[in-house]
Image: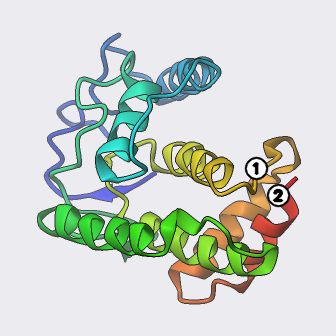
Amino acid sequence: MYDAIDDPYTYENSTVLVNKLDLRDRDQLDAYEAEISNARSEEPLPEGKLDFAHFCAVHHHLFQDVYDWAGKPRTVRISKQGNPFCFPEHIEAQAAKLFAELKAVNFLENLEFDDFSTRAAHFLSELNAIHAFREGNGRTQLTFFALLADNASHPLDLEKLDPELMLKAMIESFAGDEKELSRVIRELIT
C-alpha cells in the first residue's frame, strides 16, 4: 500500500482507490485488478516507440477496465514505507530524461548479455523511482520491460520470475544498489 496525503484517487475516508466497478473493499479491488490486468497482458500490447507515451499506453491497456485515470501520470505525491517516489510535478521531466537516455543507447539493442543486464537494471530502477502512476507501476514496468527486452533481442522468460526476489531487488535498486536487479534480469533472459 502506498502512503499519500490528501489523495483524490481514493474514496472519502478510505484508502481504497476509486474504480470503475465502485468496489469499496480493498481485497475485492485487488483481486479484480489482478484478474483484469493479467487478462489484458495476454492480449496484444500497444505498439509504440518505446518512449514515455508508449509506457503510458501500456499502463492504459492493462488498467483501462479498472481506473478512469489509466495511462495518465499521477498528480499526488506518494511513498512506500516512508520512501518518496518522484514528485508528480517532476514526472514528465524525469521520464523525458530517462527515455531520452534509453533512446541514446539505442534501446539497449546490440548489447552483450551482461552489459544488457546491467543497463536494463539501471533503466528499470530509474523507471521505478519515477513511479509514474498511482497504482499498477510494477506490472506496467515489467510488461514494458519485456517489450524492451524483446526489441533488444534478449527476450525474458517471465515464468522464471520469483516475485519476492524481484521485489527485494527493486527495493535494493531504489536504495542505489542495482547488482541484485541485474542478476535477476540475467536469470530471466532466455
Residue 155: give its label: 1
Name the quadrant containing residue 23: top left
Identified by mark 1, the residue type is Pro
Q: Nearer the viewer, residue 4 or 48?
A: 48
**87 to 144, vertically: above or below:** below
Where is residue 120? Give x, y as percent: 61, 70
- Relative to residue 163, is residue 100 drawn left or right? left
Say which residue appears at 72% left-offset and 62% top-offset. 166
Disc 1 secondary structure class: loop
Where is residue 48? Give x, y as percent: 39, 39
Where is residue 62? Give x, y as percent: 47, 28
Disc 2 secondary structure class: loop
Residue 107: give its label: none
Say which residue appears at 23% left-offset and 48% top-offset. 73
- Relative to residue 15, is residue 129 drawn left or right? right
Q: Residue furthest bottom?
A: 176
Which label's residue is closer to the chain start, 1 or 2?
A: 1
- Relative to residue 53, is residue 38 drawn left or right? right
Q: Nearer the viewer, residue 130 or 29?
A: 130
Q: Which residue is mark 2?
A: 189
Name the quadrant containing residue 124: bottom right
Q: Nearer the viewer, residue 48 or 136?
A: 48
